Image (spheres, helix red, strand yellow):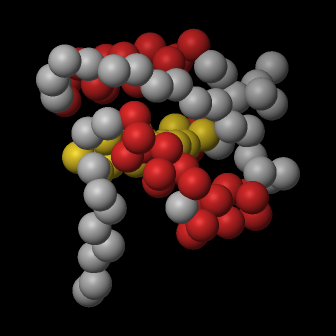
Amino acid sequence: MRYLRLHGAVGLWLWARPSEARGGSISVWETEQDMRRFVRWPVHADIMRKWRARVGLATDSWQAAGFDAQGVWARARDTIDLRPHPQAG
């Protein structure tokens, strides 16, 4: 298997809530510049362009003094819980 190394990438988690037809990712970057480089990366941009009409998209970003996995998950969980699926009743 071949792995791609992305400059500044610290970690990535995928999450899913199948009963709500929702899922997403949480990515951690060393700097905001590293994250923006990834967002502009042609491969990522192409995927997002192809899926844009099929999915709802919500983003959140923040900076922290250090990496704390539990803190990242707590913040992400709050964001996920506060943004219900657009199709939800």
Front one among 47 and 19: 47
Q: Quadrant of residue 68?
A: top left
Q: Where is 40 relative to 21, above or below?
A: below
Residue 27 x/y as whole percent: 37, 42
Q: Where is 31 relative to 40, above or below?
A: above
Q: Quadrant of the C terminus?
A: top right
Residue 88 x/y as whole percent: 76, 25
Q: Where is 71 relative to 40, above or below?
A: above
Asked whether, in this view, residue 17 is left or right of residue 45, the answer is: left
Q: Quadrant of residue 50?
A: bottom right
Asked whether, in this view, residue 16 is left or right of residue 88, the answer is: left
Residue 10 x/y as whole percent: 23, 46
Residue furthest to the bottom = 1
Residue 63 x/y as whole percent: 33, 21
Q: Where is 64 relative to 67, above or below?
A: above
Q: Residue at x 30, y 26 (%)?
A: 73
Front one among 71 and 16: 71
Q: Residue at x 29, y 51 (%)?
A: 9
Q: Residue at x 73, y 39 (%)?
A: 56
Q: Residue at x 44, y 14 (%)?
A: 78
Front one among 75 and 81: 75
Numbered disc total:
0
Q: Quadrant of the N terminus?
A: bottom left
Residue furthest to the right = 53
Can the viewer see residue 78 in this picture? Answer: yes
Asked whether, in this view, residue 64 is left or right of residue 87, the answer is: left
Can the viewer see residue 13 in this picture? Answer: no
